[in-house]
Amino acid sequence: MALASAKTTLHRDTTNAMQAALNISQKNDRHHDQQRIAVAFPCRPSAPPHEMASHNCLTRKLAKLLGLHFIEGYSPDTHEEIAGIYYLPADTLVTTAISGHTAPLPGVRTERDLFGGMAPYPFVGTKAITHPLVHANAKAPNGWSSLFGAAVKDAVLRGVTAFTADDAISAGQKLLSHGAVRIKSVNGSGGRGQCTVRNRTHLIEFIEQHDLGELASAGLVLEEHLDNVETYSVGRIQVGGLIASYVGTQALTPDNAGNLVYGGSELRLVRGDWDALLTLECTQAERKAVELARIYDEAAFRCYPSLYASRRNYDVACGLDGAGKPCFGVLEQSWRMGGASFAEACALEFFAAEPEAQAVRAFTVERFGPGHQAPPTAQLIYQNKDPHVGLITKYGGISSI
């Protein structure tokens, strides 16, 4: 009887121990699941409400796609250290913290850890990378690759990146011999931070008014101006195991001050990489845009081998140059979330839900002022009076298969 009682006690204790271990394991699993999160971080300092709404909306959609928890308002200062974070930074990250640029985030090692990109130097994530220097001995930041400018010479418009006022004036004067010159802030977006000059006097006036400290640290882009421009969006995105590539067009719209700014994108996306994209029935202009973007993309990752990005977007312009001749060229890259990213996410969501689907169309729209409503088939991203830009409506979705 004593032996039987001991066996019963041992069995009960063993069972209790196993159940306790199982409970701990399940608790740890739940804790691990809770740790796997997606965050809209880092954000731009003082980002306007409409931009934060877009950032959060995109993060929420990608979190759902990846099976992660979305945490709004994440900050490492207010949240305990969490492993396995998927980041959606507002800007291209930089490998090393330089002059206020974002330092690497914990756990970010490859393009699978974020929606965006990680650049080896601050200038690599801006418009500055697109054009060569005015001459071989011109001032340039540490890490500048002269090989990149040579590799993309035939894929971009005629232009120069300058880091001093003298170099900018010299470059501008040379470009003016071919027609009007567009001067761009390297960190501008949505068509803002640009002006067009048509003579030497206006060129010098503009450059002399430019902040010399910003010019030295960030650079300034001077590029031939095109008329009758149509801008194509070409890109490649990867989220989890899904890869998609696309070509499409951008629209301009008047903002509440009457300036023409980014108004949305219409994209045609395919499942797969650049080769899959070229299997689409494209117009001659679309195919040219894809080919130029691919040259730029491959040169960037070859000349800056530590660069990686899960979101790779290129704006390609088609217009008339100063002589009235048709001209194509990549304007800039974006290795960060952008205006078309919500459409990109909608397409990935569609491909995940429809494993046999190979192509889809998606769109985003941005409109200013009253009288704009999202159609029933679209998802509203933001509609409110933003203190920075006024009343703005933003929406997007799938347009057709």
Image (spheres, rainbow, N blue to C red):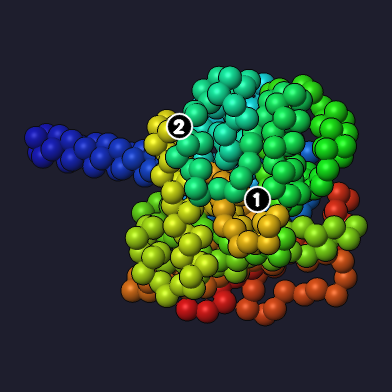
Q: Residue at x 41, y 72 (%)?
A: 280
Residue type at the position of mark 1: His
- The reply, left or right, for residue 114 in relation to residue 164 is left
| Tag of residue 55 | 1
- The reply, left or right, for residue 1 in relation to residue 367 is left
Labels 2 and 1: the sequence-earlier one: 1
Residue type at the position of mark 2: Leu
Q: Could you classify mark 1 by the number of other residues whose Cα lies within 10 Å: few (under 14), some (14-19), or many (20 or more)?
A: many
Q: Could you classify mark 2 by the number of other residues whose Cα lies within 10 Å: few (under 14), some (14-19), or many (20 or more)?
A: some
Count of residue discs: 2
Q: Where's the N terminus, which quadrant?
A: top left
Question: Where is mark 2, residue-wise?
Answer: 147
Task: Looking at the picture, tell me which residue is in the foreground, 108 or 330.
Answer: 330
Task: Looking at the picture, tell me which residue is in the foreground, 305 or 70.
Answer: 305
Q: Residue at x 54, y 44 (%)?
A: 335
Relative to 395, does residue 311 appear above or below in the rendering? above
Element class at badge 1: helix
Residue 370 visible? The answer is yes
Relative to 269, does residue 2 appear above or below in the rendering? above
Q: Residues under labels 2 and 1: Cα distance?
A: 35 Å
- The reply, left or right, for residue 178 in relation to residue 198 is left
